[in-house]
């Protein structure tokens, strides 16, 4: 048991030592099961894919394209630091066996926000994401398709029960914070966007 505890502590120390830059946000409100946040307008590097499976779209297709961009497949042949979270906008299909539209993005580090290198892959582009007002629910572990859906449904129910108004329940974001090599203390989130009430 002591060996396991020591390994868990070592893994957490290594994770902190390898901390990566995260997209900035302002915390508006913190409830028991969710947070309300505002992300300022920022640049993200982005790609999209149609698929029935979140896992297939994100792990096998889109992540590789975005990773190649930060690994030097850009007009400056520049390596760019990995950031967090990796967000995926999910626009559900019209039926149970229809393809969903998945749009995955990496936050462009602050050092490159003013002038990010242009992707050389035509499927990848720099997104000027406007200010994003979200409700976020966190959960842990290696997330599969069902985990994303269950946590989005729970966030929906919590927001409805709390009487939150102006929430867009037609689409949602998934957000992952850890590399595949992180085994312990993995963090995932689902986000619903709040519509501009002005």
Image (cartoon, rainbow, N blue to C red):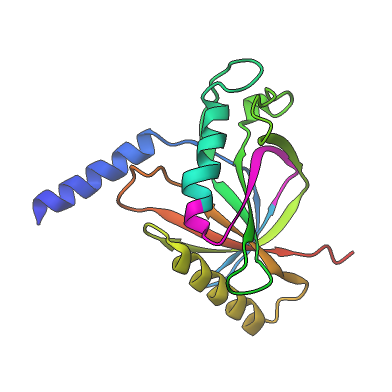
Taken as a whole, is the magenta stretch helix, strand or loop? strand
> Residue 176 location, x and y as percent?
49, 51
Locate residue 128: give its quadrant: top right
What segment is highlighted magenta in the picture? 39-56
Residue located at (73% from left, 23% from top): 115
> Residue 162 location, x and y as percent?
64, 81
> Residue 159 location, x and y as percent?
64, 76
Classify 22 as above or below 121: below
Asked whether residue 174 appears in the rendered view, the answer is yes
Residue 94 lies left or right of residue 69; in this view the side is right
Q: Residue furthest front?
A: 97
Which quadrant holds the C terminus? bottom right
> Residue 164 location, x and y as percent?
71, 76
Classify 45 as above or below 52: above
Residue 97 lies left or right of residue 40; in this view the side is left
Locate residue 76: give its quadrant: top right
179 or 64, which is in the foreground?
Answer: 64
Residue located at (66% from left, 27% from top): 119
Classify 86 as above or below 36: above
Q: Residue furthest bottom?
A: 161
């Amino acid at each position: 048991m002591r060996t396991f505890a020591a390994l868990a502590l070592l893994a957490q120390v290594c994770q902190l030592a390898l901390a990566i830059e995260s997209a900035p946000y302002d915390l508006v409100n913190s409830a028991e099961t969710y947070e309300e946040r505002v992300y300022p307008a920022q640049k993200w590097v982005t790609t999209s894919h149609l698929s029935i499976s979140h896992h297939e779209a994100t792990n096998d297709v889109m992540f590789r394209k975005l990773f190649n961009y930060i690994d030097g497949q850009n007009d400056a042949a520049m390596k760019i630091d990995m950031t967090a979270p990796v967000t995926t906008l999910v626009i559900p299909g019209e039926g149970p066996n229809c393809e969903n539209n998945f749009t995955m993005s990496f936050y462009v580090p602050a050092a490159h926000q003013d002038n990010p290198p242009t992707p050389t892959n035509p499927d990848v582009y720099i997104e000027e994401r406007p200010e994003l007002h979200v409700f976020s629910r966190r959960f842990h572990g290696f997330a599969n398709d069902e985990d994303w859906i269950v946590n989005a449904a729970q966030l929906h129910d919590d927001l409805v029960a709390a009487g939150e108004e102006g929430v867009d329940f037609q689409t949602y974001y998934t957000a992952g914070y850890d590399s595949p090599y992180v085994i312990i203390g993995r963090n995932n989130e689902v986000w619903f966007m709040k519509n501009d009430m002005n």
